[in-house]
Image (tube, rainbow, N blue to C red):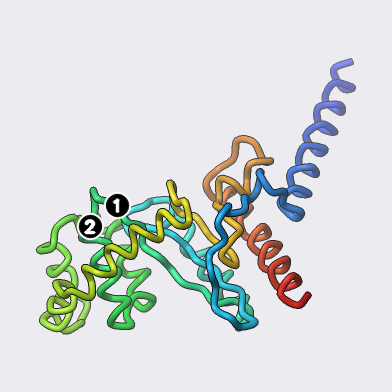
């Protein structure tokens, strides 16, 4: 009887795993992703736009970043990927840091370095002075950075960042938007897996992204 129970339990676990993996590879609206009520405009080309809403101070964004970077590389010219740092009134300096680096064309180059500084070295970038002190360590022209950091251009972009949060209905991060309409995240992608690790959630996200990009590509051709 005990042996039969073990067999039944094992079969049950295998069935749950099969169903969960099937869900990841064939995502459902309302589960592994949702669709924005107000679809946002995307560039008029063949590439599929993928936006990640993230924050330098977010530990979940930090954990996802290496996997997401590898996924981006595998997509090649199929996608147009961009990051949007979330607007959070509790942490404006990190947002201004991102916007300034983005303006200078340095955001992607310093992405991993900033994540490492915040989450490994425990550098606190919650003041303008702390941001400028950090920049001095990167080799970037501190005066040029400071001029842009305190410019009207960055103030305008700060306002735009808040508007984007509202337009895309962002209330948690990391969140990814595919083709201006499909919304997903690691926790959403892993909803059918039940209780799982953060690594499990992040791994579950990748096939969901693949599926959504493929769907957007197919619909663009029609």
The answer to whether 173 appears left or right of 104 in the picture is right
In the image, farthest residue toward the top: 1
Q: Quick one: 4 or 68, which is closer to the camera?
A: 68
Q: At numbered mark 2, what does the secondary structure look like: helix, strand or loop?
A: helix
Q: Residue at x 46, y 54 (%)?
A: 174
Q: How many marks?
A: 2
Vertical position of residue 4 compared to residue 211: above or below: above
Q: Residues within 10 Å of mark 1 (few under 14, many from 20)?
A: some
In the image, residue 219 lies at what x, y percent? 74, 70
Disc marking residue 88: 1
Q: CA distance from mark 1 to mark 2?
A: 6 Å
Q: Which residue is mark 2?
A: 92
Q: How many residues crowd around disc 2 within 10 Å: few (fewer than 14), some, or many (20 or more)?
A: some
Residue at image x 34%, y 62%?
A: 161
Residue 76 place in picture, x, y as percent: 60, 81
Label for residue 139? none
Q: Residue at 32% x, 80% y: name it.
A: 106
Q: Are marks 1 and 2 in contact (CB under 8 Å)?
A: yes
> Compared to 178, does 202 lie above or below?
above
**Seen in the image, is 70 located left or right of residue 83?**
right
> Residue drawn 66% across and 68% down?
213
Q: Is residue 62 left or right of residue 132?
A: right
Secondary structure at numbered mark 1: loop
Query: With respect to residue 21, does 81 lie above or below?
Result: below
Q: Position of residue 101 (x, y in %)?
A: 28, 76
Picture quadrant where residue 109 is located: bottom left
């Amino acid at each position: 009887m005990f042996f039969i129970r073990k067999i039944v339990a094992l079969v049950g676990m295998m069935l749950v795993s099969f169903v969960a993996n099937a869900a990841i590879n064939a995502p459902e609206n309302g589960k592994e992703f949702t669709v924005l009520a107000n679809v946002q405009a995307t560039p008029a080309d063949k590439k599929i736009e993928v936006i990640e809403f993230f924050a330098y101070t977010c530990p979940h964004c930090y954990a996802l970043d290496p996997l997401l970077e590898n996924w981006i590389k595998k997509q090649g010219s199929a996608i147009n990927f961009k990051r949007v740092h979330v607007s959070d009134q509790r942490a404006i300096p990190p947002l201004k840091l991102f916007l300034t680096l983005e303006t200078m064309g340095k955001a992607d180059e310093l992405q991993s370095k900033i994540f490492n500084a915040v989450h490994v070295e425990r550098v606190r970038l919650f003041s303008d002075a702390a941001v400028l002190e950090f920049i001095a360590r990167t080799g970037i022209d501190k005066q040029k950075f400071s001029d842009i950091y305190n410019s009207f251009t960055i103030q305008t972009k700060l306002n735009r960042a808040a508007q984007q949060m509202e337009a895309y209905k962002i209330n948690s991060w990391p969140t990814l938007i595919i083709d201006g309409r499909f919304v997903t995240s690691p926790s959403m992608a892993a909803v059918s897996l039940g209780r799982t690790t953060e690594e499990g959630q992040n791994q579950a996200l990748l096939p969901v992204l693949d599926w959504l990009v493929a769907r957007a590509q197919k619909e663009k051709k029609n």
